[in-house]
């Protein structure tokens, strides 16, 4: 027969065990703070359709903490607002935080999930990344400078007479650079199908990433509806997008492959080295095609957005423009055009570039991640499959770090390369998914900025009465955020710079060696 003390001990043990289980389960279910949701739908009704990063920033101010958490139906999501948390999760635990969430309309249904920018981390992703990493190695990007400088000069030549075509000219000249490098093909006319195809597909992709754009993104089960079912018209839309994507990916590749042997492809290019090595398997060929298109898609939108932000900033801040021009004049002189290599001697220009990415980052929420497994951060439970946003905009507009963040102010860095690097690092990704083409992308932007400031004044547009238009600006809510349309003028600074531009101008039928 059990003694009284034994019974007491057993009872106490049960209490301690129950408490331990309860405590662990309670502790495991701690979450980041955030708004309360409704049963079944979570916080769907609280998510804005425009500038979601601003709402997330307001939530952070309301609830505090390094991140906020919300729920879309049964899908948990967190939004990181702290560089410390980025390092702890996305870098130190990159093996957990390097997957991508499944996009239904813009990814799964349209076929874009095959690109390495949208794949989960794994062997296939690593293989595709290696294919393009060799092209953008730090020691190789300098050989692409003549191409970038040439197209930047053509851009300004064209904008002098057609400033209203800014967006199209940026698409054209940046497209020339990237397509030439990847495929060895030189675009010779604005309606070239090898340029039009990716631009059309990127329009579709941007549409697919708009918050609330398609009901199937909120209710993924709808994707199983047959195409004839009322309300399932998204299937036909997705098919159009898929065909546009295949045209953009494969047509220029087939041209490059067919013309490599005849010597018509310009060298070097991404495909030439791999195709010349021997016969590729069907799987290897597909990886090569998707690697190239991922670079093309990402490079086009990011560079175009950053360049548009530059022109907008110069219109709004003529005093900064004049100071930048004075620095270029002092270093470069007026007998030649600046080159990308001149940036080493132009600290104010470097500050302007950093401030462009801080003032309005082209990727305000980055590209979302997904957790590959359950995780625990200081007692906070992060479930497998949680969507992870990084509110880059919030961190770069924190008034405690960047006083008067709404003001475009290159002087805030005090010529500190370390402070500028912090801004650029936030813009170009973290951990294993950091942008592989950052050095190349920065070269293109420097070419545009330096050529513009050395040769022209960027001015506000004028109305029918000849008065300058007060520039009002906003930004799109797509995953890559662009300034909304604005009017501007481009005025050559002197007859001399016109001569230099015209002498350096590369006709559409030619292409520099790289």
Image (tube, rainbow, N blue to C red):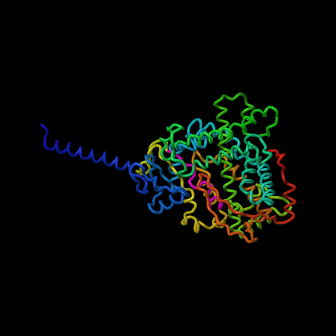
Give percent across and percent down for residue 185.
Answer: 77, 41
Asked whether residue 278 appears in the rendered view, the answer is yes
Towards the viewer: 178 or 201: 201
> Is residue 17 magenta-colored?
no
| Residue located at (86% from left, 59% from top) | 500
Name the residue rendered at 81%, 64% in the picture: 492
Q: Is residue 344 visible?
A: no
In percent of width and height, residue 415 lies at: 67, 64
Q: Horizontal and vertical percent for residue 513?
A: 82, 44
Horizontal placement of 26 versus 422: left or right?
A: left
In the image, residue 232 above or below residue 169: above
Which one is in front, 438 or 365? 365
The span picked out in magenta is 354-370
Pick the residue in front: 88 or 56: 56
Task: Name the quadrant of the N terminus.
Answer: top left
- Extreme residue in the left direction: 1
Q: Quadrant of the C terminus?
A: top right
| Number of residue marks | 0
Query: Looking at the rendering, which quadrant does residue 194 occupy?
Result: top right
Residue 137 figure quarter = top right
Q: Is residue 366 left or right of residue 443?
A: left
Left or right of 9, for residue 373: right
Closest to the observer, 470 or 445: 470
- Is 365 a magenta residue? yes
Q: In x, y percent, where is residue 202?
A: 65, 47
């Amino acid at each position: 027969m059990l003694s009284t003390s034994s019974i007491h001990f057993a009872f106490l043990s049960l209490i301690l065990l129950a408490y331990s289980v309860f405590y662990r389960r309670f502790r495991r279910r701690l979450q980041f703070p955030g708004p309360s949701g409704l049963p079944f739908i979570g916080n769907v009704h609280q998510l804005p359709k425009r500038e979601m990063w601003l709402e997330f920033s307001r939530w952070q101010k309301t609830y505090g903490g390094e991140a906020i958490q919300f729920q879309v139906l049964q899908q948990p999501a967190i939004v990181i607002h702290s560089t410390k948390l980025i390092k702890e999760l996305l870098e130190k635990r990159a093996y957990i935080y390097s997957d991508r969430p499944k996009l239904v309309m813009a990814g799964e249904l349209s076929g874009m999930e095959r690109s390495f920018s949208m794949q989960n981390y794994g062997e296939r992703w690593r293989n595709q990344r290696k294919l393009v990493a060799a092209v953008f190695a730090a020691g190789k990007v300098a050989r692409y400078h003549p191409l970038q400088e040439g197209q930047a000069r053509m851009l300004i030549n064209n904008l002098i007479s057609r400033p209203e075509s800014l967006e199209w000219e940026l698409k054209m000249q940046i497209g020339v650079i990237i397509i030439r490098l990847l495929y060895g093909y030189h675009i010779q006319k604005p309606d070239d199908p090898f340029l039009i195809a990716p631009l059309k597909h990127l329009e579709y992709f941007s549409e697919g990433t708009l918050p609330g754009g398609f009901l199937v993104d909120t209710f993924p089960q709808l994707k199983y509806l047959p195409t004839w079912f009322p309300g399932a018209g998204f299937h036909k839309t997705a098919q159009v997008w898929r065909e546009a994507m295949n045209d953009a990916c494969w047509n220029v590749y087939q041209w490059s492959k067919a013309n490599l042997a005849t010597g018509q492809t310009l060298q070097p290019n991404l495909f030439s080295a791999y195709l010349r090595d021997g016969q590729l398997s069907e799987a290897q060929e597909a990886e090569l095609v998707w690697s190239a298109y991922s670079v093309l898609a990402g490079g086009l939108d990011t560079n175009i957005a950053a360049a548009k932000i530059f022109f907008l900033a110069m219109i709004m801040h003529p005093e900064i423009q004049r100071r930048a021009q004075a620095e270029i004049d002092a270093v470069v002189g007026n007998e030649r055009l600046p080159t990308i290599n001149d940036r080493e001697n132009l600290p104010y220009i470097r500050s302007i570039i950093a401030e462009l990415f801080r003032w309005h980052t082209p990727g305000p929420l980055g590209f979302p991640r997904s957790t590959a497994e359950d995780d625990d951060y200081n007692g906070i439970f992060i479930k497998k499959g949680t969507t992870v946003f990084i509110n880059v905009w919030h961190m770069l507009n924190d008034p405690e770090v960047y006083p008067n963040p709404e003001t475009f102010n290159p002087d805030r860095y005090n010529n500190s390369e370390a402070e500028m690097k912090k801004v650029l690092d936030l813009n170009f990704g973290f951990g294993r998914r950091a942008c592989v083409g950052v050095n190349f992308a920065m070269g293109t932007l420097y070419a545009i900025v330096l050529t513009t400031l050395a040769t022209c004044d960027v001015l506000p547009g004028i109305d029918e009465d000849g008065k300058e238009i007060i520039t009002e600006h906003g930004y799109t809510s797509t995953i890559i955020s662009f300034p909304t349309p604005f009017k501007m003028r481009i005025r050559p600074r002197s007859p001399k710079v016109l001569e230099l531009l015209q002498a350096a101008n590369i006709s559409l039928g030619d292409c520099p060696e790289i």
